[in-house]
Every structure is written in structure tokens, then in C-alpha cells.
Amino acid sequence: MREILGRRRRFLSRRGGGGPELIGAALTYSAQWQWPVLPGVAADPQGRSRCGCPDPECTVPGAHPFDPGLLAATTDPRMVRWWWGNRPTAPIILATGGKAPCAVSLPALPAARALAALDRRGMRLGPVVAGPVRWSILVRPYSMEQLGELLYAKDFVPGSLRFHGEGGYLALPPSGTAQEEVRWERAPLPGSASPWVPGVEAVVDAVVDALTRTGVSAPEL
């Protein structure tokens, strides 16, 4: 289904309080879109600003895999139902790469400005995930060799850009983290068999160019 430019209708973006919203979204990602997912570690119930994992210095509190580990990610709806039936408030973690989308992320404020610049240029983007600190643009799967060649050819790449490829992960809406809810900034169209996503080359070229032209210096976050 054809994506539309600009801000899309919100989809699967209700507040992540657990229950039908989370399990419904997890089943859409896994069974309908064939994106491998698994439940992430939740925020510490004794202190919502802290992660529930054993690391007291966790840098992504409540938004990463822990138990089970990332290799357990699956598209099997039976496993997804069992996981969220037992852990209804667990964040939804996408295992990036393989046949699933990868992502390019950057800090939220520069990301918002870069997306506005790309909209003015009429560039087509796919889904964009807005986290509490960073926004992630979903892209087609890429290899490390492909990414290395792309970055090597660049005169300048902001150090704040991060690449979520094979072996990486990303929290998906409507997950709640220890910081705030993950939401869609650009949502997939409802009913999409599998959301369209652009190639990593087009996204990196456009984002670097937009940041340069708008004079935005993305901080190292």
C-alpha cells in the first residue's frame, strides 16, 4: 500500500499500559508483518526511572532484551501470545536485520528538524519510531559491508547517528520504557501487509544533507 508523505495517522500508538494494546501490536508485527520480536525488560516497579535489569547504570532503561535474550526473537504468534500473556506490560523489542527492517537513529531534536527538511523536499520516508531520547527511521535490511562502504564514501557523518543492523534491536510502539512511551512519529498505514521502508543509502544521504543545510549540529547522545 502506498505510503503518504507527511505526518501519518497514528497506528498502534495508544498508551503502553499493557493488555490488549501491547499484545495486539506484538502480534501485528510478528504474525502479519513477519518482524521477529521478543519481550524486553520492563522498568523497575520500585522506581520507574530505573531499569528492571541488574545493571544499575543501564543506559536504555526498560527498552532492551534481557530474559529471554535477543536470539529468542520470533514471528511465531503462539510464542508471542505466551510471552505477553505472562508479561502483559513488557516492551516490544524488534530484532533488527535479517528479513526485518534495520534503522538509522539520531537525537530527537535534530531528528525532528531533519524530517521537516526532508518533508519540504518531498522525500518519501517509511515508519519513524520516536523514543524518549532518539528517533529511529526504519530502513531496508543492510549488511555491515554495505554500511561500511556507505560511510567510507562520506566526507562527514555526524557522530550521533546510530545504526541498528543485524544483531541489533529497537523498542517498538506502544512500549513503555523507564523514561516515557515509545510512539510512532510516522506510523505505518493501517492494514499494511508489510510496511514499505526506504534503503539505508537514501536515508543516510538525505539526513546528513538535511543536518548540514539546516545548520543543525546533532549532539553526541
Image (spheres, helix red, strand yellow):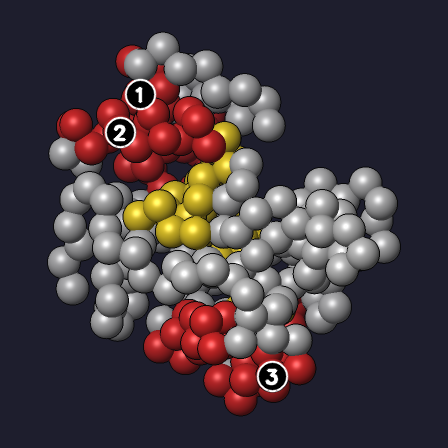
Secondary element at tag 3? helix
- Neighbourhood count class around disc 1 (C-alpha, 10 Å): few under 14, some 14–19, many 20 upward: some
Residue 176 figure quarter: bottom right
Quarter of the image that includes the C terminus: top right
| Amino acid type, label 2 | Ala
Residue at image x 33%, y 27%? 114
Label whose residue precedes the other's in the sequence (1 or 2)? 2
In this rendering, position of residue 28 left or right of residue 60: left
| Amino acid type, label 1 | Asp
**Which residue matches tag 2?**
116
Comparing marks 1 and 2, which lies closer to the viewer?
2
Kindly indicate whether the residue at mark 2 contacts the one at mark 1 (C-beta within 8 angstroms).
Answer: no
Secondary element at tag 2? helix
Residue 187 figure quarter: bottom left
**Which residue matches tag 1?**
209
* Residue 84 drawn at (x, y percent): 59, 78
Regarding residue 97, the answer to whether it shows in the image is no
Kindly indicate whether the residue at mark 3 contacts the one at mark 1 (C-beta within 8 angstroms).
Answer: no
Query: Which label belongs to residue 85?
Result: 3
Residue at image x 85%, y 55%? 54
